[in-house]
Amino acid sequence: MSAQDTEEGDRDLFDMSLEELMEVEIYSASKKAESSFDAPLSSTVITGEEIIASGATTIEEALRLVPGMIVREESNGNYDVHVRGNESLPPGNFTFFTENSLTLVMIDGRRVYNYINGGTFWEALPIGLADVERIEVVRGPSSPLYGPNAVSGVINIITKQGFSNSESSVTANVQGGNKGTVIGSFNALKRLKNDKVSIGLSGNIETRDRDHEEYYNWWTGEYTPRSELVNYNNGNQIEDSYGWFEEVEMAKERLGVNAFISYDINKDVNIDLKTGYQNSVSQSAFFENFYSVLGDRTSESFYIDLTSKIKGLNIQASTESGVQDIARGSGFISTMDYNKIDLNLDYSFELGNLSLQPAFNYQQATYSDVPYIEPNTIGLMNAEQQLSNYGFSLKADYKLLNDKLRLVAAGRLDKYNVPDDVYFTYQFISTYKFNENHLIRAVASKSNRSSFFIDSYADYYVDGQVDVAYVGNRELLLPTMNMVEFGYRGKLSEKLILDVEAFRTVFENAVDFQPTEFYNSAEGPIIEFNYFNSDLISTQSGVTTALNFAPSDKIQMRVFGTVQKTELENYDKKETGINPFTMELPTYNRVDQENKRTPNFYGGMTFNYRPLDKLSIYSSFYYMSEQFYRHERASTSEQLGTTTIDPVTTLSIKASYEFAKGFKGFVNARNLLAGEKDQFGFADRIGALYLAGINVNL
């Protein structure tokens, strides 16, 4: 069950006991519905009710409520999200290496992964907060269940449309405040009289301005107006005619519309059809422009998602098409048409205490910049290209010793077109439930990432005094992660629940991008940049602890934190840049060192208090310890290209009052205590956000 849809109808968070909150259903941990307490992997469920109560203004910000999550704000409403870290590998590279390419994000099981350069365009998700039934977060490698890119974990956003027991409801959230921020979303579901058909419609809109109109200037090491920005690669000052940073004050603009229909043919057969559209633009850290970390990216897309359940057979087929400009305003063609196709088939059957689930999955992505290339223009690929893979998996789940001992094994074979190779991933899990109050688990798993279009198919050539070529590599080994983990969940009392997980991961085959050749040709000197697998090995060891406490029926608390250390072996640290006068390539120094881009400690606390039946106050505290970010700029100026990010401390408070049944007015303060500091590294200095609005739940 979820916190909202139960036989008793709508329930407030305070109407549920701590034990009921911990028993909220989760699907993503094992691809079958089960109690979150019994889930065999490190996982967390946050309900839509808690997200709304917390005052989180985006799905990304709501992930600050989840243990094991690193969430940095780059500009107003744009976030950098990681599960446990392992980000910016190898250090000292270009901006696009900061993107999280190791976590698979899904909406109702539909992958919303971006294959241009990996990661998730969060602003391009078509749904809003009113759509969210719950968010399921699984920490640790999960490719055996979900295929490539579920390396550090899985974030599965379950919508009200995707929740099988959804009843008729109307949910809306509208708020506005400083920094030009306006946020609105609604979701309406109707269960028709025959009780077999459900229909739904939802929409969302969001506009935000930046905290300031200055950018960190790679050339001067200071925050300056756009007009003073200088390209650190060639020393040229930006001109008014350049398209970079077209809307200086804009942080994010987005809108989305979704429609849904579900038909329950009988108790064993169900068909769901979801479709939607989104249009978005954001100013965030993604693609290198040599002036500053921030840049514009735009996205417009349309999707169709069809799911069907026929007894034990689950079928999901989806497609998404659109156009994305990953570096709006650049001097090259950065706009691409794309289409993604996903097909998933799995069947579950029981043989006594043994459950078997074979599955087949096909994924295909096609990207093309050809329609936008004109004479005297240059694209990143200058072609239509395709990435695809098909995979076969089998999961076995066996219970013995009166269901106290549970053994889970999953294996998956994936055949890729790039590289032309087969990869095997696995997951071995053992849990032992001493009684209803105590459970321990052990996990050993391996997962891999997929290839990306820029890594594989880059074909970029610029004429100049020194010609520059970017060359893709279709023979790259896929980055992989191995993990060993031990965990404990315990209901220490009716008011206190503890969850502890200790993990060790080893990440290998990281992809690097560096100049590898500098030579003379008949047309003049040429610098060639290539993608290749580095010898870097990243080993991370850590412990995450979460404590849930409900001392009374008016107070609910959660305290959580992660202590970790990430050590790098065979890191080729770039010491100098290219010397165009002597035609010398950069120099490197191979070192072993700690990766301080991932904070050694991060976590938070939530405090939900209801002093009156109609009044509730939700406070959330989030903290990240000191971090160190080294950009490629450091190869020419260590001082200008490296920064120490002071500890980040944010406090957010939302106070809500129900002035009529189903209607709540609220005031919402976000990012208090942060002190207008840079949370990401060379990005915007984030200040407080103050909002007021109305929540509707009918």
Image (cartoon, helix red, strand yellow):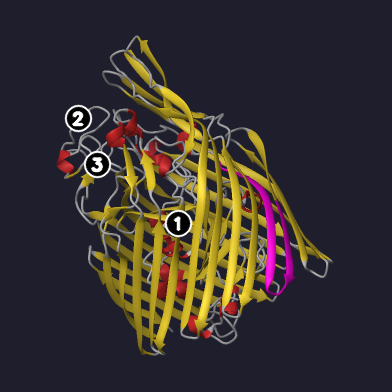
| Res 389 quadrant in image | top right
Q: Residues within 10 Å of mark 2 (few under 14, many from 20)?
A: few
Residue nearer the viewer, 402 or 120: 402
Q: Residues within 10 Å of mark 3 (few under 14, many from 20)?
A: many
Q: Which residue is mark 2?
A: 236
Say left or right for 382 vs 274: left
Q: Is residue 443 above or below residue 533?
A: below
Counting residues from the N terminus, which is met first, the one under dot 2 or under dot 1?
2
Counting residues from the N terminus, which is met first, the one under dot 1 or under dot 3?
3
Predominant SS of the magenta segment: strand
Magenta region includes residue 447: yes
Marks 1 and 3, how far apart in space? Answer: 34 Å
Q: Which residue is mark 1?
A: 602
The secondary structure type at the circle numbered 1 is strand
Amino acid on which the number 2 mark rests in the picture: Asn
Marks 2 and 3, how far apart in space? Answer: 14 Å
Residue 244: numbered disc: 3
Amino acid on which the number 1 mark rests in the picture: Tyr
Q: Where's residue 268, x and y in %? A: 71, 72
Marks 2 and 1, how far apart in space? Answer: 40 Å
Magenta stretch bounds: 428-450
